[in-house]
Amino acid sequence: MGNIQRFPHSAKAASTNPLKMSQPLGAALAFLGVDRCMPLFHGSQGCTAFGLVLLVRHFREAIPLQTTAMDQVSTILGGYENLEQAVRTIHERNAPALIGVATTGVTETKGEDMAGQYSLFRQRNPALAGLKLVFANTPDFSGGFEDGFSAAVTGIVEEVVQPSETTVKGQINVLAGCHLSPGDVEELRDIIESFGLSPIFLPDLSLSMSGRQPDDFTATSLGGVTVERIASMGASELTLVVGEHMRVAAAALELKTDVRSVFFDRLTGLEASDRLVRTLSELSGRPVSAKLRRQRETLVDGMLDGHFFYSRKRIAVALEPDLLYAVTSFLADMGAEVIAAVSPTQTAVLEKLKAATVMVGDHSDVETLARDADLIVSNSHGRQGAARIGVPLHRMGLPMFDRLGAGLKVHVGYRGTRELLFEIGNLFLSREMDHDEHSHAHGHPHRDGHEHGQHCGSGSCGCSAG
Amino acid sequence: MLQEKLQDVFNEPGCSTNQAKSEKERKKGCSKALKPGAAAGGCAYDGAMIALQPIADAAHLVHGPIACLGNSWDNRGTKSSGSQLYRTGFTTDMSELDIIHGGEKKLYRAIKEIVQQYDPPAVFVYQTCVPAMIGDDIEAVCKFAAKKLGKPVIPVMAPGFVGSKNLGNKLAGETLLDHVIGTVEPEVTTPTDICIVGEYNLAGELWLVKPLLDEIGIRILSCISGDGRYNEVAQAHRARLTMVVCSQALVNVGRKMQERWGIPYFEGSFYGVSDMSDTLRTMARMLVERGADKAIIDRTEGVIAREESRVWRRLEPYKPRFDGKRVLLFTGGVKSWSMVTALEGAGLTIVGTSTKKSTKEDKERIKKMKGEEFHQWDDLKPRDIYKMLRDSEVDIMMSGGRSQFIALKAKVPWLDLNQERHTPYAGYDGIVNLCEEIDKTLSNPIWRQVRLAAPWDLKPDAKPDSRPVGA
């Protein structure tokens, strides 16, 4: 791999075509994975409106999200009254099981004391003692989407989970990071249940954000993990922690419940999936199902068929940190060369990335770094830059507003890895087939003059080479 | 200073709603207090961005933490025929340190970078809540940068927490009046130069209108701000006439242009057949009053006659298909009302509308047009709409994107009327587009299928979902 250029100093003052999204938005997504929940932004109404539109465009679902509607006066004098009024109004109108409050830049700059406001609210509203209330500190001016998601999950663990004297055999917890789509969570449920285990996902987006058809109108989240199930997480045998940004929540959960946890930095890729399957098999004492065995076999077969098209392909990836890690690691597993890995925020997982350049940046940085790349992997916001430099874009992450079924994409486990492998592989394959139609020169000189090995002399791509 | 500006825009003599109020009410302004926990809609910064971002060759820089731009960029359907710079999102992405030390220096560096790298004719700098709270003097920074860099750098003072989207529209208009309009002289002027205010070229709507104006011989000197160019906007003061579209939001621009440069203005609409014709007629008449060649009146009448007969002929096939079909209009404003006549002309029945954002006069007007029995809801809750749709009281709902799922989850056809849509509805061709869209969704075969019961829910004596299905 040669020299890795880590964190080249980006001296830019103007973030251009930002990759970063704000903390409260991440918190809102986490809250949406809890059944009958209403996320509430403590800030001006615009904070909520923008976040709402972004999530609506990605999931193509109604998104419950409310605001404390701070104006100039309440911002200066303090927002407690707005907060209390908002919580009471939501409770009266929609009677949610949980209200998830996320602060914003407005209330954090003022320095609202959320812990104090929580106590004050409980004191003044004894009648609402049954309502679960989670306050997460999520200032817009630090961290990003993943951090907000993490703060909300940690808040839910601290507010809702109960320690338990007894253990329920076969029950396991899964702290599911925001790099897992609703489709991924669904896939994990299938895998875990095939071992006779009963998983509790926190949050569970597969039940709420995967396209519901309600019988009646609902103003809160519909589906997701119930508050009762979350409370019972203390009785589980094991917690699977998926993603670096779930570590804080995992620590909070362990501290509260003494349930042992196992950490997975990713679930995309053959070895990563093997590790998950081994863990589940050991825990349950059951053999691996025939279905999973077949899936592994087809993944191995897909890797053999597909590696021709991945070898030494130059790829730039720009995603939220844990998804960035999963995707770049998978691409490296397939023999591709990740020339640039761009993250919206600085986090520990970036240290582990295998890429020629690792940096904290935006879509304009991707545009610069990916000029001679074969592929860019990023969210839909990457499409303008990719089009300008004429490099194909494979869409992953959030927002993905120009594709149907964005929330149902699967890239975990044997089956998900296989799907990702084929999707990206097909982009390369179709490019090579197009190329063959125009000229029959194989192993053509690359744009930078180097000879790049794109031979398919084996005839594996279906063309008769040579 | 911002407070004075706010009082100024609240006291709008050009706004009939405002004039109908008492002195005391007027002082309170036109933004209603929002109810925490039950509010919806964008903020003032959002509104300012909507009004100015269509100026396509300018750079639009948002001074604030990431949420203001990071969560919102690249989400509007306004189109440009040339420069695409407006689609690039710029933000200072304020961090904790910027908040402690102040963001002014970073803001200046950001402006400088943008000017050096992109060389736009101007940079618009948007104030947001957080720098407003910590006291970043962005007006001073802009002034300094403009002098230093030799380019207009325009502060847009509409931080989100001052009010609603509509207020942000107005403040954006004030920004143009204070800093932009009148700063550039056009090379040529003609007696038929007009300025259009409040048209954002969503889905390319302006391009359905412009060919007709070209044919009549009316020149759009300046459009604020759809498919706009900075220099064209800056020349607006040389127009002979201003047309104010979507009146409530930007009427301040029309009125002040009249005050300052003696340019008369009228409020018009490009939506609906008769409104479109009225607009063209008024435009021609007022231009002639100001000395334009009388021939444009005849040309206008010629275009209207041809287009009207063409549009009614093209709407004819929809009539039998739309017969008996009931429409629920769920949009706040009155702009959709210009479409109503055309939709009824095509055979649709409008059963009701929400009047949340409408004024008293609007409501009276609707009552006059539609009679007492027509439903007007002031505060229709999503739950109530859902029930109406489920109970088959309407065949299609037309609304903004946010409420689409109320209809879709009730398995009822829905059509987008607001800014995220992809089809232009303005002008004569636009109304045909609209009817085609309605017909497409009403007659789509999915409605019958999605209402079928699942096989495991089928009981021998169960009745199928008996709701009527599109044409």
Image: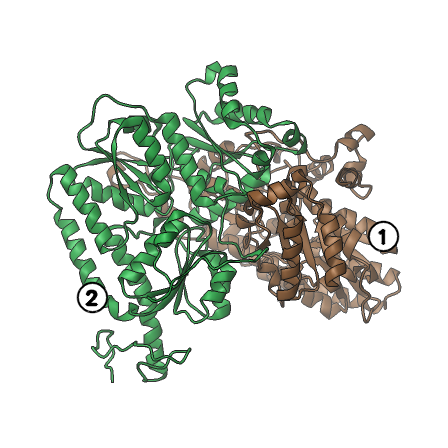
Chain colours: A green, B brown
To the question of a shared chain for discs 1 and 2, the answer is no
Amino acid type of the residue tagged 1 in the rendering: Gln
Which label lies toward us, 1 or 2? Answer: 2
Residue A421 position within the rendered picture, expressed as x and y whole percent measured from the top left: 28, 61
Dot 1 crowding, Cα within 10 Å, few <14, some 14–19, many 20+: some
Does A294 sit above or below residue A256? below
Q: Is residue A456 left or right of residue B156?
A: left
Q: CA distance from mark 1 to mark 2?
A: 73 Å
At 20% across and 66% down in the image, what residue appears?
A304
Which amino acid type is marked by label 2?
Answer: Leu
Name the residue rendered at 48%, 24% in the picture: A91
* Mark carried by residue A304: 2
Residue B467 versus residue A397: which sits nearer the camera? A397
Which residue is painted at 34% across and 56% down in the image?
A: A327
Residue A165, compared with residue A64, is above or below; it is: above
Q: Nearer the viewer, residue A170 or A139?
A: A139
Q: Position of residue A170 (x, y in %)?
A: 18, 33
Q: Considering the numbered disc 2 on the image, is that residue within a helix, a strand or a loop?
A: helix
What kind of element bears circle 1? Answer: helix
Q: Mark 1 sits on what residue?
A: B258
- Asked whether residue B152 appears in the rendered view, the answer is no
